[in-house]
Image (tube, rainbow, N blue to C red):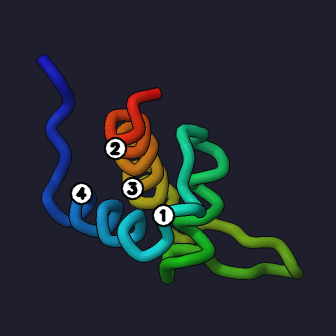
Amino acid sequence: MGNIRQTYIKRVAIELIRHYPDDFTGDFSRNKQKVLELTDLGVTVEGHLQASHKKLANRIAGYATRYVKRKRGT
């Protein structure tokens, strides 16, 4: 059985990929940074970007990673 994700996680991830297709890859860490940059889930503290809602950012980045890998066939 696979993982079931909430609709809002899928919707946000797909919209981000649709608007910024070159920014997302099959690398989770890079996708997580992009999610934090492009949404309001990231907060800049002393010049460094940190997650204000870490679990939600991880779920969106994880789904985006799986979506990109499946879409691009890698």
Which mark sits nearer the N-terminus, 2 or 3? 3
Q: Nearer the viewer, mark 4 or mark 2?
A: 2
Residue at the disc numbered 4 = 10
Return the residue found at the far top. 1
2 and 1 marks in contact (CB < 8 Å): no
Up/down of 25 relative to 19, above or below:
above
Q: CA distance from mark 4 to mark 1?
A: 15 Å
Question: Most extreme residue toward the right, as rendered?
Answer: 46
Give the number of the mark in front: 2 or 1. 1
Indicate which disc residue 67 carries: 2
Q: In the rendering, which numbered label is found on residue 5?
A: none
For label 2, the SS is helix
Element under disc 1: loop
The amino acid beneath tag 1 is: Pro
Mark 4 and mark 2 residues within 8 Å of each other at the beta carbon: no
Q: Earlier in the sequence, mark 4 or mark 3?
A: 4
Where is residue 64 drawn, in percent x and y?
A: 40, 50
For residue 21, which numbered disc appears in the image?
A: 1
21 or 43: nearer the viewer: 21
State which tag comes first along the sequence, 4 or 1.
4
Say if 27 sits above or below 3 in the image.
below
Label 3: state its secondary structure.
helix
Packing grade of label 2 (10 A; few <14, some 14-19, many >=20) is some
- On the picture, is 16 further left or further right than 40? left
What type is the residue that disc 2 sits on? Tyr
Q: CA distance from mark 4 to mark 2?
A: 9 Å
